[in-house]
Image (cartoon, rainbow, N blue to C red):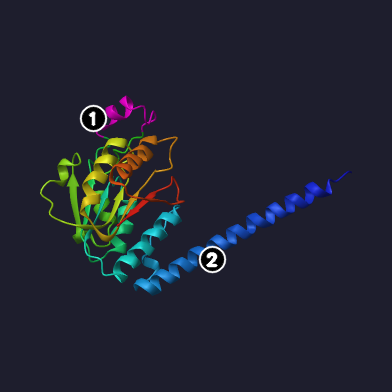
Amino acid sequence: MFVDNELHQSNIRRGLVTLFNRVLSKRIIAAICSSMSNNIGRKRADYVFDHDIIRSSSLELVAHEIYDKNSAGNTAELGVFRGEFAQKINLAFPDRKLYLFDTFEGFAKEDVEQEKMKGYSKKQHNFSKTSEELVLKRMKFPENCIIRKGYFPETAKNIEDTFVFVSIDADLYEPIYNGLRYFYPRLAQGGYIFVHDYNNTKTYPGTKAAVKKYCSEMNINFFPLSDIAGSAIIMK
């Protein structure tokens, strides 16, 4: 039986690389958890990591920077859905208010219509399977959470506050652009905005368009994070 030695060796190398990456990934995650628990003073068991370790760990490192610099301000998320990332924000900032902006009923019809008119997001997902109660049950510090149910930015009226961390995960062009218009002027010095789905151009191309338009108008820069779906990170 003829054996292609070059092919055989290539398969062995590929298998070893895969095994090495799996072991290394586990060690990296453990090291990140250990480092964060030491630096920020919380137990490793408190951390809630999902499949998107890069975004989760980046949030924790950003929180450490904010506390290290004593940056003032509260936190917010626009586009909460079932509260998976909001739970992490709540944990990372245990002494800050967390404003939660969402319809809690899925995409607003007017935003979907705008998306179609602009030629974005042909495929729409259903994000209606959620509730304020479900989200609050996830929170370790629910007393810090302020639910703002309804259509944004109308739900942001009469808020006299500054923000040190904001997550925008609204998927569609209109709410993302309006979110940046609202939050960036209210972002404290040393604060951060994470815009999720920036590089998810197949599903939500309006995200990248909204970020680029606003950042171009304001002449501000952002950093593309290599997390799942690719976030854009804006800071002051």
- Nearest the viewer among 202 and 86 is 202
Quickly name the residue at label 2. Answer: 27
How far across and down, in percent of the image, does residue 40 sit?
35, 71
- Asked if the stretch drawn in magenta spans residue 120, the answer is yes
Identified at 24% across, 41% down, the residue is 178
- Callout 2 amino acid: Arg
Q: Position of residue 42 (x, y in %)?
A: 35, 71
Q: Is residue 158 magenta?
A: no
Residue at image location 22% in from the left, 59% down from the top: 74
Name the quadrant containing residue 25: bottom right
- Are the two marked residues, 1 and 2, in contact with CB atoms closer than 8 angstroms? no
Q: Which mark is residue 21?
A: none
Side of 27 where 144 appears, left or right: left
User: Is 33 on the left or on the right of 40, as rendered?
Assistant: right
Instruction: Tell me which segment is drawn in magenta.
Output: 108-124
- Front in this rendered view, residue 98 or 87: 98
Which of the 4 quarters of the picture holds residue 53?
A: bottom left
Residue annotated with mark 1: 110
Task: Judge from the rendering whether residue 211 lies leftward or rightward of residue 31; answer left or right.
Answer: left
Residue at 39% from the left image edge and 30% from the top image edge: 123
Dot 2: what SS? Answer: helix
Residue type (three-letter) at the residue carrying disc 1: Glu
Q: How many numbered marks are there?
A: 2
- Residue furthest top in the image: 117
Q: Earlier in the sequence, mark 1 or mark 2?
A: 2
- Measured as percent of width and height from the top left, residue 36 is found at 40, 69
The C terminus is located in which quarter? bottom left
